[in-house]
Image (cartoon, rainbow, N blue to C red):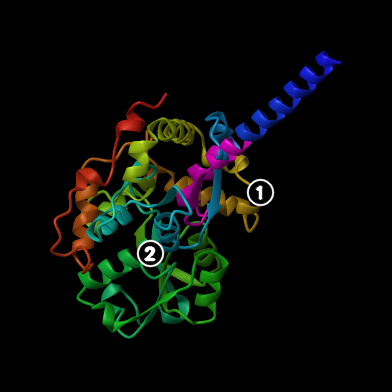
Amino acid sequence: MQRYIQLFSRLIFGLLLTSISFNSFAAEKIVIIVSGAEKQIYLPVKLAERLGYLKETGLNIEILSEPSGVNAVTEMLSGAAHGVVGFYDHTIDLQARGKQVQSVVQFSRSPGEAILVSTSAAASIKSPADFKGKHLGVTGLGSSTNFLTQFLASKHGVKSSDYVTLPVGSGSTFIAAMTQKKIDAGMTTEPTISRLTSSGGATILVDLRTPKVTEEALGGPYPAACLYMSTAWVNSHKAEVQKIANAFVKTLAYINTHSAEELTQVMPPEYSSANKQQYIDALAASKDMFTADGVMPDNGPETVLKVLQGFNKSVQGKKINLANTYTTEFVKAAK
């Protein structure tokens, strides 16, 4: 009888330990928000998930999607997320506002975006100098598409007060805003760009999809998509950050060694359901935007800072320490 009591006690104790371990594991969930998971500029995230590289880390990682980068930033700062896959320029903007965050894996070296002009407004908009009095679409107010639109306008002598900026999201909502003439022009990403241009609904005004055309338009390399996190969290969770970096560096290497068609086959079918060949062609044309190793491109941070200083009142006049806006520690140590 005593033996049965001992066995029963051990069983109960084991169940308690399992419960404690499970709860601890659940508490260690790492939430990463993507600023629009369906966008080709953020392809490395879904690809890493589909290839099983995130699962290989052994971490409990949850990927969430948020249409606008500025909303994703808010989620991270509120503590609802540990990291954001968005544009590097937010790290500079946030430092100017007293928040320390840093890019830990740099996905791309150009925005992968373009400013489109609707067919109905094409006659009156020949360059950003013609934005005065127009309605311009961006993913969200305070988003990177908003940053770049403001810079291109100011570069051509147009103040932000001279035009109306509308947050219209991306994908179908952006297309609807343009076809319904709510916006005259706007900045968006692939595959939305190809969907609109192929249908004759819009033409490209400013192309920032590859490093070459980006340097011509912005004066240098413009590191864009990346995984950025709170500096304090990175410093206190280096083992976890390293595992995440390993997964994404492995994914970037996969992108670098596989064709657009092969990459599309791995991605969720619904991402290319509108027109699979169009999706493949768009990816093939802009795949060069992705880094091969997650390392920040030379002179990239300087270009981004210069762009933000051109219009962003939060950054203008502030002393920005670019070395604190990114780290190559984890990507260079990645296996």
Q: Quadrant of the N terminus?
A: top right
Mark before the other along the chain sequence, 2 or 1: 2
In x, y percent, where is residue 65?
54, 55
Residue shown at 45% from the left, 51% from the top: 41
> For mark 2, what is the residue?
143
Q: Is residue 262 visible?
A: no
Q: Which residue is mark 1?
A: 269
Q: Based on the picture, tell me whether residue 46 belongs to the magenta stretch.
A: yes
The amino acid at mark 1 is: Pro
Q: Nearer the viewer, mark 2 or mark 1?
A: 2
| Residue at 44% in and 54% down | 79
Q: Which residues are magenta?
A: 22-48
Residue 121 lies in the magenta-colored region: no
Q: Position of residue 124 (x, y in %)?
A: 35, 82
What label sits on residue 14 in the rendered view? Answer: none
Q: Quadrant of the C terminus?
A: top left
